[in-house]
Amino acid sequence: MALKEYYVRDLVINDEYGIIDSNATIQDAAKKMKELGVPDLVVIKGEKEKVVGVIADFDIVQNVVAVGTDSKTEKVISTMYKISPVTLNTPVTEAFTRMRNLNVNVVPVVENGKLVGVCTIHDCWSYIPDQNIDEIGLIPVKNTRVAEFWFASACAIVAFVIGIILPLVGVYGYFSGNQADLLSLLGMAEIRGGKVIFQLFEVRGTDFFVSFIDLFTRNGPIWMVIEVFSILLIIIGIVGLFSIIYVSFSDTRKLETGNITRLLIPGLVVFFMILQWILFGIAFTIATPPPTIAIDVVGLIMSIISMVLFLMAINRDYIFREKSTPSSTSSEVPY
């Protein structure tokens, strides 16, 4: 499938820009930026106003303020970054590449040698065609990046709610048993009867609850370990949730993200959910006398569903593939 080429003229050129002479001082540039409320100024030279570069507020901070240079005497031309202006007929990919290679945000746009505006790297993002068609995935969609963003966000939010929030508020738990069979473990003498559920931070019955801190003082450090890992599960869960949303959104904007944010942090959520079940199993195994306990089936099913949803959000690239349509070669509108 051929990819449509976009040009700078297809962008909305920002004509609200400021200019400054190359022989002006840095202080003059800073004052003009403040006056116009802009972070960049196009640098021109001579009466013909030849475009020679751009000066940004970051350049002033890094090259003048940080090194202690006098802004009243330092010239703009010594601090600006030099970038060849583009024309309205310049491909967007070329304009994007110029800014990316210099790690800058703005490139001047000229027409017949006259400055007509500026183009930002943000303007170009949505007009950069993918070089490779996404053929990996099960469900064909027109825009895989947007579909993956909404899919991953929905999966992560639902997984966080059913896997962490619901056991936290006591809708279901990890293990359950009869209060009469757990007197020794709970440190209780009164038999009240009824079902008790081991939740994220406590054991709750019909009209009572026992915190894991209380179980720690009676049954050993394993319950403190469970308490600590419960706290970590919530923290990692929140970070993992926002990590998935952030990475999938960054993909729609074609921003690169590292494997720590993309894979490690969300993967840790699944790891901690599995570890929580293992720690409960260890606690009941080493308890003396061994308690009569059973897995909370609803809690187990919900945990499995939650982990599957997190894994699906992490591996969203394998869910959707690009839909190939003949009309996309000529009439596709950039997202």
Image (spheres, helix red, strand yellow):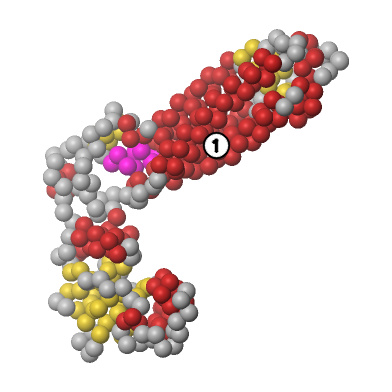
- The answer to which quarter of the image holds residue 12 is bottom left
Residue at the spot x=33%, y=63% of the render? Answer: 103
Name the image quarter holding the N terminus. Answer: top left
The extreme front residue here reads 67
Residue at the spot x=21%, y=57% of the render? Answer: 93
- The answer to which quarter of the image holds residue 17 is bottom left
Q: Residue 154: x, y in percent?
A: 45, 36
How would you rate the neighbour count of disc 1 (Cα within 10 Å): few for under 14, some for 14-19, many for 20 or more? many
Q: Residue 222: x, y in percent?
A: 69, 25
- Along the viewing direction, whichever of 167 and 224 lies nearer the viewer: 224
Residue 332 appears left or right of 171 = left
Q: Is residue 195 visible?
A: no
310 to 119, vertically: above or below: above
The extreme right residue here reads 189
8 to 180, vertically: above or below: below
Residue 1 appears left or right of 173 = left
Point out the stretch of residues depicted in magenta. Answer: 143-150
Residue at the spot x=37%, y=32% of the render? Answer: 315
- Tell me if residue 148 is in the magenta stretch: yes
Q: Main secondary structure of the magenta part?
A: helix
Q: Secondary structure at mark 1?
A: helix
147 to 275, vertically: above or below: below
Under mark 1, the amino acid is Gly
Q: Is residue 265 visible?
A: yes
Q: Residue 237: x, y in percent?
A: 55, 37
- Tell me if residue 175 is in the magenta stretch: no
- Along the viewing direction, whichever of 329 and 43 lies nearer the viewer: 43
- Residue hosting label 1: 237
Q: Residue 70: x, y in percent?
A: 45, 85
Numbered marks: total: 1
306 to 184, vertically: above or below: below
